[in-house]
Image (cartoon, helix red, strand yellow):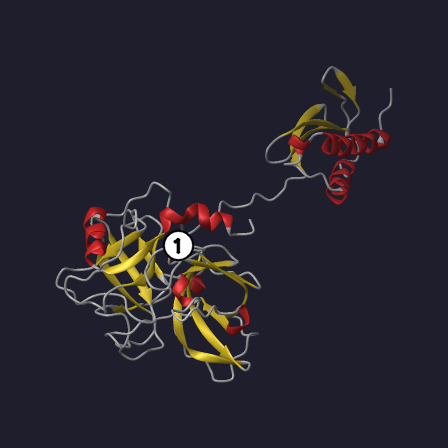
Amino acid sequence: MKVGPALLLLVVVVLLEIQDSDSKRNKCSVYKKRLTTCYKQVKALKNPPGRCKINKKWYNPGALTYSRYTENGCNINVCRNGKVFKRTICREPKKPNPVCGRPQSSDEQGVLYTFDPTRIVGGDVVRGNPYPWQAGMLGRRGGIISTSVGCGGALITSRYILTAAHCVKYRNGYEVKPEEIAFIIGNHNLSIPSDATYDDKDIYKVSSIVFHEDYRPQNSYHDIALIKLVRPSKASVVCLPDASDMFSGYNGVVTGWGDQKFNGSGSTVLRQVTLPILAQATCNDYILTTGQENTKDEIICAGFPQGGKDSCQGDSGGPFHVRKTSSSPWIMAGVVSGGHGCAFPNHPGLYTNVAKYLPWIKQNMDN
């Protein structure tokens, strides 16, 4: 029995029907264009001599028969020179596992910035771009973008920034509107020209703002908010913690454009400071001394007993990073929330414990 191009066409039809009827096989999407390419490759063999026996059936040289689907593609059998050659076709490109907490491109690791000592209390200038997810909130009025950062934030997906609720809901009850702010991402040197527009590649419009429904501006409880961007960012994202993560005893790194001293001045260069994280029981006891109620471990405290190093105004909403080991990715353990002054003795900085808000974050993201 002679088998020719008609069999190849039949196989194409069968492959497409199998894909439609079996959802489990959708991992290999069989496109007509790709099958046509495969058909041409088989036809180009020019019918070399030697028939093949495939699954107890004989096929002429160049014949193509469906074998099975795999996770990575469609395995097929090609008859050539009397032997069966197995090939994988119609392979979908594997989606890489999402990588977080690490700079991914050379652009995110390169430029060294000049030293500017007027930010985060007791910290150092950030050199290169080890925190590409760092975001800065810019104000907008009458179409003009502010050239200074009012709050920080961190990119947790390509479209969402995690920040503090008090950055978007003020003590007087005013709620910031999406059209009143923008974010700069991936540029640690905030030398923003006065004629900057929302079309600049590092500046992102805001689509929506969601702050925690139980947030009250009078205290630090539930001080967390999500910002959705109009367009996705290509910058690397920071990792979120696991729900069971506890960071007591670790050192954390705060990054931001906050003042170097209480009620100090601003700067255009990102800075960082490393702070020890207090035991949770100690943190809870401290919060009670401020006249506030028990926060049920929803706040992280970090700082030195003698003070001298801390986050400050302008750092609010920014990431408080932790790395479990020197080779681990950065985790956003906390959101800069508040504290008594900046770097005062016996007054640690307060950070919203992100691990306690993972269900809320998931609930308030589109996907």
Given residues 55 and 44, the one toward you in this image is 55
Q: Is residue 287 left or right of residue 62?
A: left
Q: Is residue 156 above or below residue 141?
A: above
Q: Position of residue 96 (x, y in %)?
A: 52, 46
Q: Position of residue 230 (x, y in %)?
A: 57, 64
Given residues 359 and 9, the one toward you in this image is 359
Q: Residues within 10 Å of mark 1 (few under 14, many from 20)?
A: many
Give amino acid for label 1: Arg
| Residue at disc 1, secondary structure | loop
The N terminus, quarter of image: top right
Q: Is residue 226 above or below residue 328?
A: below
Can residue 110 be seen from the camera position used here?
Answer: no
Q: Is residue 59 above or below residue 306?
A: above
Q: Is residue 255 left or right of residue 132?
A: left
Can residue 298 be seen from the camera position used here?
Answer: yes
Q: For the point 28% across and 76% down, which residue is it? A: 115
Q: For the point 61% across and 30% down, which residue is it? A: 70
Given residues 203 and 315, the one toward you in this image is 315
Place residue 346 in its image quadrant. bottom left
Given residues 146 and 42, the one toward you in this image is 146
Dot 1 corresponds to which residue? 102
Q: Position of residue 5 (x, y in %)?
A: 84, 32
Q: For the point 26% across and 57% down, which residue is it? A: 292
Exactly how many numbered labels are in the figure?
1
Q: In this view, which residue lies farthest toward the top?
A: 56
Place residue 117 in its image quadrant. bottom left
Place residue 93 in its image quadrant. top right
Q: Position of residue 199 (x, y in %)?
A: 57, 74
